[in-house]
Image (cartoon, grey):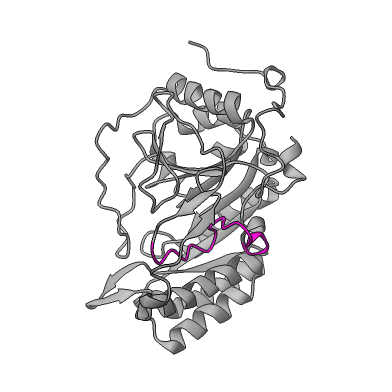
Amino acid sequence: MDIRINCDDFPVLTRYFRKDVPPFRVCITWLINNKCNYRCSYCQNDFKEPDGFRVLEPEEWFLAWKRIYDNYGTVAVQLTGGEPTINPRFFEVLKEISKMHHIEIQTNLSWAPSELIRNIPPQRVSRMGASFHQEFDDIVIFLKKMCELKDAGYKVEITYVAYPPFLKDGEKYLGMANEAGIPFSVLSFQGEYQNKRYPENYSEDEIKFLKRLNLSIGNYAEAMAKWDVEHKVIVDKPEESEDILRICRMGQMYAWVLPNGNAFRCCKSPVSLGNIIEGTFNLLEGPEICRLKNCICWRSMVVGEEERWSNRWPGTKEKAQD
């Protein structure tokens, strides 16, 4: 089967396109795999694929995302893992999917930038987020790759995990990224270090340091820093939020998809939306009550709080017209 397609084959299906509902474009996070070519000290991945996982052939990938296009028009697809690019023929398949959908890639950038440049035009990539891992990468080589992508027209950003023993290095890396003109976000460590759980056990000084680093680069990082602080507070005082039920558009305008194709309302929700590979995937028809206790997701689509989250998603009204 020849999976090469022509963009003219895919007119915008405004009847199905949820362009009038915040965030004005359906967003889907797809965990392509749970495997990685790195073994970072702070990684919580157990490198085990879920039941039913199999490596898809390019034709199967194409058909899964073609069905989503037919039902919902162009969506924003965030590709992550594991390391998504280690999947066989990743860039070949991505080239075809990007003709229907807008792409965001979360990667460790262990590959040559030319792979992306020769396959996918920058206007089809809403964001190329690369995580810098100092145990496996040299910052100079890493920044050279990022600059190559930036010069080719891609919107690039660097993320760095605030693992307690590495936290002190964040300021140096931030300075080097600033010199290169590339946004740099410091993300909270999620896990255990020296018998302490994080981010709950960041000290006040560490939280201030994280916030200072992140506030230097704008709204995206400011929201992440705010999430860190709120997470610490809500874990310390969970009784303040245990009975809060909120109406949320997660599941209506967003889906979380696992390597076996199973889709859920969000990364914490047990609410199933079907399977994208088997063709049973369906978004919710409208916003529904979130029954998760202590949910403080910084991008949760709570109805009535659009000013907080709508610009955190790649779906402005201007982008949603294509």
In the picture as drawn, the residue positioned furthest to the top comes out as 1
For residue 200, what is the image quadrant? Answer: bottom left
Work out whether 284 lies above or below 278.
Answer: below
For residue 42, what is the image quadrant? Answer: bottom left
Q: Residue at x 57, y 74 (%)?
A: 214
Q: Residue at x 30, y 54 (%)?
A: 45
Q: Is residue 85 magenta?
A: no
Q: Which residues are magenta?
A: 293-308
Q: Residue 212 at what x, y percent from top left?
A: 57, 81
Q: Nearer the viewer, residue 230 or 175?
A: 230
Left or right of 262 in this view: 195? left
Q: Residue at x 29, y 33 (%)?
A: 53
Q: Is residue 64 visible?
A: yes
Q: Nearer the viewer, residue 74 or 60?
A: 74
Work out which quarter of the rendered image holds the C terminus and state it.
top right
- Magenta region, main secondary structure: loop
In the picture as drawn, the residue positioned furthest to the bottom comes out as 205
For residue 5, what is the image quadrant? Answer: top right
Work out whether 295 lies above or below 170.
Answer: above
Q: Residue 298 at what x, y percent from top left?
A: 53, 64
Left or right of 12 in this view: 250? left
Q: Residue 180 at what x, y percent from top left?
A: 65, 64
Q: Residue 193 at what x, y percent from top left?
A: 27, 74
Work out whether 178 lies above or below 18.
Answer: below
Q: Residue at x 45, y 62 (%)?
A: 138
Work out whether 103 lies above or below 170.
Answer: above
| Total tally of numbered discs in the picture | 0
Q: Is residue 112 visible?
A: no
Q: Is residue 304 magenta?
A: yes
